[in-house]
Amino acid sequence: MAGLHFEEFEEGQVFDHEVRRTVTEYDNMMFSCLTMNTQPLHIDAEFSKNSIYGQRIVNSMFTLALVVGVQVTELTLGTTLGNLGMTDVAFPRPVFHGDTIRARTTVLEKRVSKSRNDSGIVYFLHEGFNQRDELVATCRRTALMKLKSA
């Protein structure tokens, strides 16, 4: 698998992920419908024309999933045992149809698991930026990662 094991992460490491993704109207509509999010700011163009944005905004949960998902192939594919939590989620700017999102991951901290002998816990900071390098999403994530020896 392409993912890194617990031992391969170092506190302070920064990964600027190469994969970027342009968000489409279809992405936003499909995600909103699949998750039963009927917020008109996401799905109703006429309603959104009169909002503070003047247009529909992308569902923030899609933005979060994209920013966290972009790192999987590079960092955690096949080496994560699961997410333990996500905190400090913030969306400082909205994402609009046509925005291109890139992500950065920073390793904040890590420690060997106290209850398992096959894994360690890694604390990540994920940040998403639009094509103008404006911060659009942040999330601190705690992941249970396999040890190489396991």
Image (cartoon, rainbow, N blue to C red):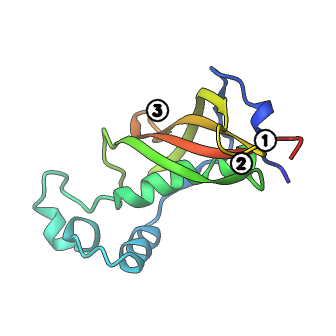
Which image quadrant is residue 88 in?
top left
Residue 98 visible? no
Residue 80 vs residue 124: left or right? right
Q: Quadrant of the N terminus?
A: bottom right
| Discs 1, 2 touching: Cβ within 8 Å | yes
Q: CA distance from mark 1 to mark 2?
A: 6 Å
According to the picture, the residue beneath numbered tag 3 turns out to be 133
| Secondary structure state at the residue bearing disc 3 | loop
| Discs 1, 3 touching: Cβ within 8 Å | no
| Secondary structure state at the residue bearing disc 2 | helix
Mark 1, mark 3: which one is toward the viewer?
1
According to the picture, the residue beneath numbered tag 1 turns out to be 4
The residue at the point 56 percent across, 34 percent down is: 123
> Badge 3, how many Cα within 10 Å: few under 14, some, many 20+?
few
Q: Give the percent coordinates (x, y) of residue 119.
A: 73, 43
| Identity, as a three-letter code, of the amino acid under mark 2 | Thr
Q: CA distance from mark 2 to mark 3?
A: 25 Å
User: How many dots with numbers?
Assistant: 3
Q: Give the percent coordinates (x, y) of residue 39.
A: 22, 70
Residue 85 vs residue 111: left or right? left
Q: Give the percent coordinates (x, y) of residue 86.
A: 45, 46
